Image (tube, grey):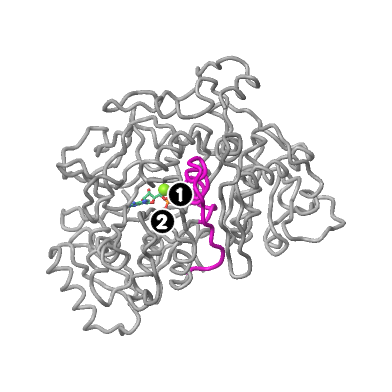
Amino acid sequence: MGQVHSEILPGRVQHSNMKDYSRAVDEFRWEDVERSFSWHGTGKVNMAHEAVDRHVQEGRGASTALIYSDTVREERYTFADLRERSNKFGNVLHKYGIGKGDRVFIFMPRTPELYFSLLGILKVGAVAGPLFEAFMETAVKDRLEDSGAVALVTTPELLQRVKRDQLPGLRHIILVGGSASEDPGLLSYEEEMAAASAELEPEWLSLEDGLIMHYTSGSTGKPKGIYHVQRAMIQHYYTGKVVLDLRPDDVYWCTADPGWVTGTSYGIFAPWLNGVANVIRGGRFSPQDWYKTIERYGVTVWYSAPTAFRMLMGAGEGSLQDIDLSSLRHVLSVGEPLNPEVVRWGDKFYQQRIHDTWWMTETGAQLICNYPGMDIKPGSMGRPLPGIEAAILDDHGNILPPYSMGNLAIRTPWPSMMGKVWNNQAKYDEYFRIAGWYISGDSAYMDEDGYFWFQGRIDDVINSSGERIGPFEVESKLVEHPAVAEAGVIGKPDVMRGEIIKAFISLRDGYSPTAELKDEIAAFVKAGLSAHAAPREIEFKEKLPKTRSGKIMRRVLKAWELHLPAGDLSTIED
Ligand code: ATP
Ligand code: MG
């Protein structure tokens, strides 16, 4: 393999503009991880080559890469298949003059063609921008406009939501599953692919060249365009090994859509850099469908999110009857805090400890995790990975002692740290306002064993009668109550106390929203947590407002409460 590279590539490239992540932390060096890559020492890389072609060159072309299913299709593709399809798609892009650095967006349901296109985009050195299929007109337009996308891969159904007349920079639209049309701006994916060559030399890039752009979930405000670069692969590969614990024979399933960072870092890159079979299940969530997916394909490693685990828990043990989940070896969660009650449910009904992992769109990959080989404290997001240093800082950058709540911060840099915030240098600089640190915007504390405990978003921390209360702790206690399905807690301004705790609650099936139940739930938190953490007001809601990635939007709850405008709602669920 090194052979192939040295033939194609000129000598060692200077790393002058690279972020220096080679700093050692506790004997750990990212440079040692870098040595597992064929490009080590050349500085010339291509994610799609590493995730796909390399396996073919090293004799694993016939191994299963993608196991796709939805209610009508069921298909398997090997690494050789992925190589061929992505080469073809790369050639289609070249034909229309698209290449290195161009932004090419994808707006379509999770089907194999999404994955072929995304890998093809990366092969030619373009920057991929996957958008979740449920986005409506304005959300799509804003993102295509902000990113300056030159091409879009979509479907005839979704094309209606693309305002082409308002996007002069969008030169080409490639329609998957569409018939040929007269419109010169519309290309047929099937026709173009049929005519394209299956051979393509990947664009060799530097570690600082672009990889992918993701707009954040919009939980706290207007989504930001986070631009990631090639060096992220070092951490995708490494965390795939040590956190996902991927081994050659694994059947891995990440339930996230590629429109969100988890769906690419861990739905594409980590599994394929590690050469593992990746299950993609199209269609909508239902407990039966998900459990059947695990059973049918013999999923061994499963990465999902608290919102899904809470819904599975809500479906009760009855939903597990006649289901065999014994293939599972390792289960992980990300996206929101993982309530201890959910961890206990996993222990009992999956015979699996659900491993919480903390990271963000901006961080590109996992940073603080529960990983195999460590003791898990339910409710804690775990410990910083080898190579990662985390701390709790006050607003001036002083490191706070254990058990003090403050800014969760990460020592800079690390390999998958974002390259920039697209079109917003000021926003980027805000994250790095304290020299040597990345300020996450999350609030947490560390215990004496070095475990981190998430408290809430910095802006969501509640100040009641001089006590600082993280909403997560209260919410976790609330969902322990048998009537409560989900809970979102906010601080409501109060003349006497500064703020009081108000809880919005959706009930489990079979419970009625009565005043007695409110009192009972408030008393339950008071007895189980503390008097000052008990909600003084409770409001029952049919559903809580959530992002399409499944996160409770506390800023919307707060806006409702205060009768204020709710702000950017482009990512809210129906
Ligand atoms: P926006 O930045 O647009 O407001 P967002 O922060 O929800 O949206 P993401 O990047 O998708 O966008 O989510 C990262 C955030 O999700 C983290 O900052 C954190 O608040 C939350 N999060 C992710 N994983 C965990 C976890 N394991 N425990 C607690 N919180 C988590
Ligand atoms: Mg965020």
Q: Secondary structure at mark 1?
A: loop
- Relative height, residue 476 to residue 77 (above, below): below
Disc on the earlier residue, 1 or 2 = 1
In this view of the protein, which residue sits in the foreground, 100 or 504? 100
Kind of residue indicated by mark 1: Asp
Q: Is 279 covered by the magenta stretch?
A: yes
Residue 235 in picture, x, y percent from top left: 43, 36
Residue 33 in picture, x, y percent from top left: 41, 29
Mark 2 crowd level (few <14, some 14–19, many ≥20, 10 Å Cα): many
| Residue drawn at 29 percent across, 39 percent down | 384
Q: Which residue is mark 2?
A: 300
| Residue drawn at 32 percent across, 75 percent down | 317
Q: Is residue 418 left or right of residue 397?
A: right
Residue 249: which disc?
Answer: 1
In this view of the protein, which residue sits in the foreground, 233 or 487? 233
Residue 428 in picture, x, y percent from top left: 46, 36
Label 1 near ligand 1 (CB < 8 Å): no
In this view of the protein, which residue sits in the foreground, 342 or 391? 342
Quadrant housing residue 198: top right
Q: Could you tell me if the residues under marks 1 and 2 are in contact, i.e. CB atoms within 8 Å? A: yes
In this view of the protein, which residue sits in the foreground, 346 or 299? 299
- Highlighted magenta segment, given as a residue range: 257-285
